[in-house]
Image: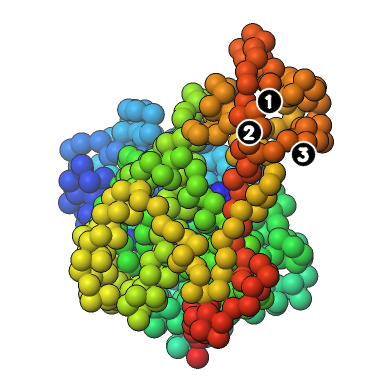
Amino acid sequence: MLLSSAARFVLGLGLLSAPLVGISQNTAPRTAAPEAPVQYSIQFPNAVHHEAQVVATFQKVPAGRPLQVRMARSSPGRYALHEFAKNVYNVRATDGQGKPLPTRHSDPYGWEVTPGPDGTVRFSYTLYGDRTDGTYAGIDAQHAHLNIPATFAYARGLEQRPVYVNFEQLPADWKVATQLQEVNENGQKVPGRYFAPHLQYFMDSPTSLGAQKTRAWQVNGQQIEMQVLHAGSDADLDRYADLTKNVVREAQAVFGELPTFDFGRYTFVANYLPQVSGDGMEHRNSTSVTSSRPLGGPGMLDNLGTVSHEFVHSWNVERIRPSDLEPFDFDRANMSDMLWFAEGFTQYYGELLLRRSGAYTTDAQYAQEALTGLINSMEVPGAKRYGAIYMSQQAPFVDAAKSIDPSNRANTYQSYYYVGGANALALDLLLRQKYRTDLDTYMRAVWQQHGKPQKNHAPERPYTVPDLQRILGEVSKDTAFAGQFFRQHIYNATPHDYAALLAPAGVVVRQAKPNVAALGMPGQIDFVNGRCLITYNTLVGTPLYQAGLDRDDELLKLDGKLLKDEKALAAILKKHEPTDTVPLEYRSRGQVRTAQIALAADPTLEVVPAEQAGQQPTPEQLAFRKAWLGSKAQ
């Protein structure tokens, strides 16, 4: 999912395949014969109506009790509940000879099937999917984009078994794009048949089917490939692939090496089609990237920003793994204290790599597209109220979560993407100014200690918040600084002085419109069918909040003049100073009321190079900026 901001904060954090344990942390593994893999088949005879037919075959099922077949409730990289069972119907269970088996729909998320004497359960169903993104399944006549937990049912107690999946009766031009391993028999590839070592890896393996266009290259003996569905030209794809190669090189330079991908291959599973939803979701050896923006034109850089962010995740999250997300639990909402680092630091690097790789062609473009959004994000009430850990813990309520009751998050919350990214920026600048090191060095140290050691498709040493603080003390050689940074900015919300931090780089933070009067934060007022409405909760400290107005109130007159459209509002404000107090007439819950509202200066900040602010940066400032923003790839 994408957050709306100049920095293009991309939601999504993927699953790292866990050790061979039960899928639910509250469920003990059941004994299962390792020689009996779980078999899936899927085909799309009614794709035009967004349906797939799925069969899951569980063999040598332990006798004596029903087999619990489940649909996941959560998904790798998502923290809210999504209840994928709602899209499953026409459920039928048989034994190996097709004889119906007793089946009970035991709860909204699963079924209990009593096995027959042959120990085989064939569990078949119809799946509906019409949302192409990193969370759900999107199926139509043109393609199928499958998030595995949203697509395939699993059986409790069989999580340790290997998994095979057959994609059957596909249209002639459809190819399979996935991180799953192709199956070979007698030296020959078996068309449409793929393998995962266990259920955790299978669930972490998004798959796209369609008329893929492939771009691939080798990096240190491993293959990086782009499997792309898009409606543009080959020239657009070639240029996009070249930009992606540059991003890959710069990401590798940050960590000093590529991860060792499990099958020697990393895949960008990419859908750039008009019918898809914008998203990016990382996985251990792949990422799912979806966007309705084409690869050519002004939206291309937004697409590339998602690619950059997700590729950094192949280190940070997929291998440098928070301990409270390992293993991932598919039966409940997963909460982590460390998304500010897992997502926020990744977001900082996703944008920084666009500048280092040359996709952002100037420092001014990077400042506008990345830094301005980050620094403005820290000016809202929520960012000043709670620290990064608290913001991370809110993910189950905000990460694509659905609710119908209003909340006050406008005043109590700021995304861990923003909070983490802003702290990463501050820490990078502090390390460069005071300790003759940088955030790259810190990330490499975290990688060496907690990311590089891997076993059985999982990290040997998932990290904790104290681990991150300890390593900061080691890199800076100042444990007091590390402790202070975490106390002030991670556990609490002490603000950074970004103007002072950016000054050594010859970068200026300033008010974008210092002499313009305003009623509140930009975007808070919207004109709908000729009505001037407050669209979300007014923010603490703003003129509208102080005057007693709130969400859904309608502004009727300001300074005695009707508010018919945006031009009328702008014309009234233009006549006033930010220090003026003016009369306001408004309607609140059916009642017309009046208030005196004290205007304020437009709070929007902007970040620009000193040259753009009419200043001449010193050679030292330019050298600092180059060391920070310049290419690191050899």
Can residue 171 be seen here? The reply is: no
Q: Amino acid at mark 3?
A: Lys
In three-dimensional space, the C-alpha distance between marks 2 and 1, rounded to whole angstroms, equals 8 Å
* Extreme residue toward the bottom, this view: 634
Residue 65 quadrant:
top left
> Residue at horizontal 62%, vertical 15%?
588
Give the structural element (helix, strand or loop) at label 2: loop
Name the element at disc 3: helix
Give the mark nearer the N terminus: 2 vs 1: 1
Q: Position of residue 114 (x, y in %)?
A: 28, 35
Q: Which mark is residue 574?
A: 3
Percent of width and height locating residue 227? 60, 69
Give the camera-side residue of 266 and 605. Answer: 605
Is the Cβ of the residue at disc 1 closer than 8 Å to that at disc 3?
no
- Which of the labelled discs sits on residue 582, or is there none? 1
Residue at label 2? Answer: 599
